[in-house]
Image (cartoon, rainbow, N blue to C red):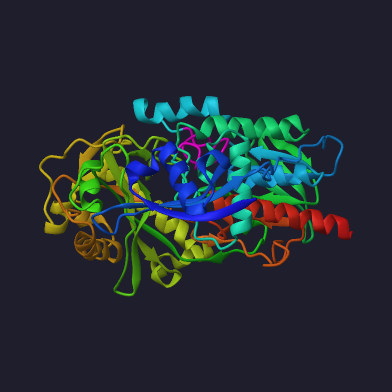
Amino acid sequence: MSKLIRLNVSPETAADETLIRKLSGSVSGIPPSGISLLRIIRKSIDARKRDIVVNLEIEVFSGSDIPAPAIMPFNQQNVTDKPEVIIAGAGPAGLFAALRLIELGRRPVIIERGKDVSARKKDIARISREQIINPDSNYCFGEGGAGTFSDGKLYTRSKKRGDNRRVLELLCLHGANENILYEAHPHLGTDKLPGIISNVRKSITGSGGLFLLEKRISEFILDGNKIKGVVVSGNEKHFSPFLILATGHSARDIYGICKANGIGLEQKSFAMGVRVEHPQELIDRAQYHGNARGKYLPAASYSLVKQIDGRGVYSFCMCPGGFIVPSATCQEEIVVNGMSPSGRNAPYANSGIVVEIRPEDLIKYSKSGVLAGLEFQKELEIEAWKNGGCTQKAPAQRISDYIGRKNSGSLPKVSYFPGVTSSPLHEWLPQAIGNRLRDGFRLFDSMVKGFITGEAVILGVESRTSSPVRIPRDPETFEHIGIAGLYPCGEGSGYAGGIVSSAVDGMKAAEAIVKKMEEN
């Protein structure tokens, strides 16, 4: 038998397994000696008051009953000779689409422009050490996608909770810690993700799936309004009537190929801004009521959002105990992003602070039509590169100086490894972004005490929060509206954002394809 109980305890108590077992016995009415298993269902921290509380939801098992496994196994099978589905992109959408296809008895053929995780590490190191960017192997492109080397946050606003759970289970089966199943804000860490991604590839190839790395798609093979296959590097052709397009929001060339082939695209809202870095200790004291964190609490984070002059201004991808990393995909641009290792033990806290951009804000770029947002992104990234000294050093400014509209004569130490250059971001950021950021910072200072300080630095630019383009699809079948056999999914489709929602999107696309195969 089992009972579901709830405990509200101090962080110190929550870390003591013996004490939790004793309390669980007291609340459930089952003596600790009679408890056969404790399974945490949910864990969250409530820091709204000075006395911080850890909320636990626990399933208490007793007797000889064997509980169902917390994780359903991966249904691995040999799909070598099964019908093939091409998957463009080896990010979370593509990888989880492949895993689901295998479970459903179909063979995934993954085509990825970048390198495997191990080789990709070397290219990423060159960005910081030599400021050289490989346009096909960097923080955005390569095995595992953009998430592999930029954090691994697993929380999502998606309401598809059952699907979210399966994503977390599959990650655990491939090496993730099982605490991601119950933490309110689960996180893998950039130090853990490469190994997990490698294990996922082994499951795919071990089942007979095909993994083609360093193959960039250059053309879609169409028969009227039907997908027939793709052409990749070296004029190599791969054929299938089903293509899952999971290339991510930074694969701008794919949107160009779509447009050139008459594949319908739509503009959508996105966001751009800067990345802000504070000392982690400052954020800890602000969020933990003036107290130091101590060993029983995690590095504190924040989530901020305001409406300013008709547009949202909000924090994005907040990384406690993390680093800022260079996420450009070509040499003459600066793009910054954030990541945290699994321990979140770095002395810095960083977050994107971004401003909503809507299609009607892009009249200046109307000649680019549906790709106007991409042009705006590109223009600002190039401007950041110029203001950083035409290197991968990021233009930076103390946040207090930005508010005061004055240059920073010096900059504090930051986590961004290529380095920073003092730059008057208040002068060159577009007013529609810059003015809202300034007002946003003032409001956020009332929410997080000390947010505006000379110790905090803003770096430009945070521009790849989401795709400015949507590839329209039928909400039920996931198939492109206009091109049969094309299944856009993940962040690049404009229908997902982040690891979990992209993975869910990929699995749903795989299920939709198999359903169509069976109907035919």
Give the residue displayed 76% in from the left and 41% down from the top. Answer: 75
State the residue lying farthest toward the bottom: 310
Horizontal placement of 186 versus 51: left or right? right
Q: Residue at x 36, y 43 (%)?
A: 13
Query: Is residue 334 among the parts visible in the rendering?
Result: no
Q: Quadrant of the C terminus?
A: bottom right
The percent coordinates of residue 443 (x first, y second) are 22, 65
Residue 182 sits inside the magenta stretch: no
Q: Position of residue 472 (x, y in %)?
A: 63, 65
Image quadrant assignment for residue 199:
top right
Label total for image: 0
Would residue 520 appear left or right of 136 to someone viewing this image?
A: right
Q: Nearer the viewer, residue 496 or 242?
A: 496
Q: Nearer the viewer, residue 397 or 507?
A: 507
Q: Residue visible at 67% across and 39% down?
A: 111
Report the predominant secondary structure element of the magenta stretch: loop
Q: In the figure, is residue 94 to the left or right of 363?
A: right
Q: Is residue 322 above or below residue 262?
A: above
- The magenta stretch spans which residues? 134-149
Q: Nearer the viewer, residue 494 or 432?
A: 494
Q: Residue furthest right?
A: 520
- Residue drawn at point x = 68 percent, y = 51 percent: 507
Residue 166 placement, left or right of 341? right
Viewer can see residue 215: yes
Residue 228: percent from the left, percent from the top?
79, 50
Q: Is residue 135 magenta?
A: yes
Residue 147 x/y as whole percent: 50, 42
